[in-house]
Amino acid sequence: MNYIVVLGNGLIILKDNVLDLSPESRITALAAGVLYKERHGQKIIFSGGHTKGRNKASEAKKMFEFMKNKFSIPESDIILEENSIDTAGNAFEVKKLLPDNSNVILLSFVYHLPRAKKIFKNFGIYIDKEYASDKVLEQNSPLYDEFLSKFTLKRRIEKILKEMFCLLLVYSIDPKGKILRIITLQTRGGSLGFLPF
């Protein structure tokens, strides 16, 4: 069976403490719907936990809710992984959900794919296909321009530079993202607690 594994790119807090998806996560959620409708996969795993606090919705749930407002997909074909807070956590938690002999289709924003693919491989998950969500949506949806307009050049440059640094760490000294997890926890105000990997 083909599983579309969807990796978000954060939540943002709007005025009045309202939680919303980042522009990249919106694009990725819509791209998941496109891939499903084009029959690339039979199941979708939205992966992303409570990155803005336990009392807030998970990234996975917000992406699913956003997608289901645009696409009619049976909820029985959706799996929410809500425990991870970073890419290494995505890989660790998704691996638990995948049956043996699953085909994995990795979906994330273009600049995040190289690091995500490498980390998933380091956790023993073979990626059969990978798709850049922005490219999927650009080629298949009139909604793309609406969301791209919210994704400024400055933000793109910042994200690309961050990914280059993270990818360098993964390839050199941090193959399973442990250092990156510590950085993520510190920047989000979390505690180190128990690191399962």
Image (cartoon, rainbow, N blue to C red):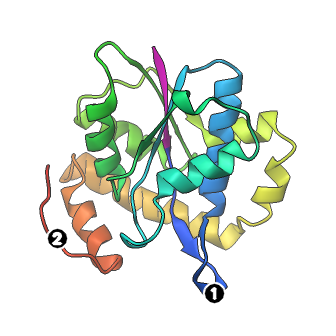
Left or right for 153, reference 79: right
Relative placement, left or right, of 24 versus 34 is: left
* Place of residue 71 in the rendered image (x, y in percent of width and height, measured from the top left): 74, 37
Q: Is residue 2 magenta?
A: yes
Q: Secondary structure at mark 2?
A: loop
The type of residue carrying mark 1 is: Asp
Magenta highlight: main SS: strand
Q: From the image, state whether disc 1 or disc 2 is nearer to you.
A: 1
Mark 1 neighbour density, 10 Å: few (under 14) some (14–19) many (20 or more): few
Amino acid on which disc 2 is placed = Leu
Q: Which residue is mark 1?
A: 16
Q: Quadrant of residue 26?
A: bottom right
Above or below residue 40? Residue 148 is below
Q: Residue at x 45, y 70 (%)?
A: 56
**Residue 192: numbered disc:** 2
User: Who's the residue at 62% across and 56% down the image?
Assistant: 24
For the magenta stretch, what is the residue range? 1-6
